[in-house]
Image (cartoon, coloured by chain):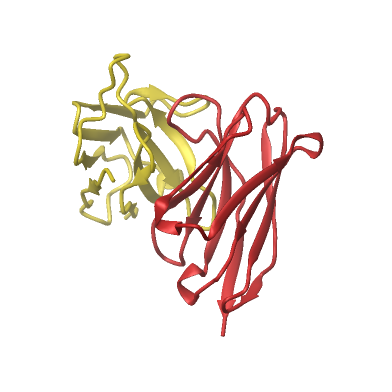
Amino acid sequence: DIVMTQGALPNPVPSGESVSITCRSSKSLLYSDGKTYLNWYLQRPGQSPQLLIYWMSTRASGVSDRFSGSGSGTDFTLKISGVEAEDVGVYYCQQGLEFPDTFGAGTKLELK
Amino acid sequence: QVQLKETGPDLVQLTQTLSITCTVSGFSLTTYNVHWVRQPPGKGLEWMGAMWNGGGTDYNSAFKSRLSISRDTSKSQVFLKMNSLQTDDTAKYFCASRTGRGYFDYWGQGVMVTVSS
């Protein structure tokens, strides 16, 4: 199975600051169709996960442009430009290249 | 709009069988895929399996032969059944849709299931 490893944040983060969350995969997620099958989700406290970014850098419908995704085949970054109260929760990366789909352990964002 | 809703028991006895229903609206099961993902309390997400729009299924081998996913397209429902439950199967169980390759775009609210001895 592909292992997804996420980095931590220096919590708590001051409101308005920009942060980057890292994710690394044990195998390249770049497929022959040119897409990189890495996705990002936010799970707010008590809620279901919400898709933020798919295919490494495409924002999901309705997601604020404060969220951006980038990376290579195995190293990825989710950037939040100017964190707000509604951004608090746990962020997960997930690979959709091959079965079984696997998720990172999550990165918690707390606001100061 | 797309919605998914899980219904199932709060409590299941040790070694018994878990049955959860995912009822979808806003799309057809013959068009998009539905997956099951679970989350133990305070822990991360684990992909369990998929019901494809063509009626096929895929399972996480971690669940070996314990897991079964089926559907009733006329009722827009997908069913999860897992037998021989253990205490570490205590988790919130989500169904989620996959309309594009590789990502889960809509999620149900989940159903919290506790396995009790």
Residue B98 picture location, percent across and down:
53, 32
Whether residue B117 sits left or right of residue A33 in the image: it is: right
Instruction: Please name the color used to draw chain B.
Output: red
| Rendered colour, chain A | yellow
Residue B78 in percent (x, y) is at 68, 44
The residue depicted at 69 percent of the width and 67 percent of the height is B9
Of residues A75 and A34, which is closer to you in this image?
A34
With respect to residue B32, does B24 lie above or below? below
**Residue A104 on image: x %, y %:** 31, 48
Q: Single out the residue that lies furthest toward the bottom.
A: B117
> Which quadrant: the C terminus of chain A?
bottom left
Q: Is residue A85 left or right of residue B18?
A: left
Residue B34, how many percent across, how many down? 59, 38
Q: Nearer the viewer, residue A97 or B96?
A: A97
Q: Residue at x 40, y 42 (%)?
A: A84
In the current view of this chain or complex, which residue is farthest to the top?
A: A33
Residue at 20 percent across and 36 percent down: it is A27
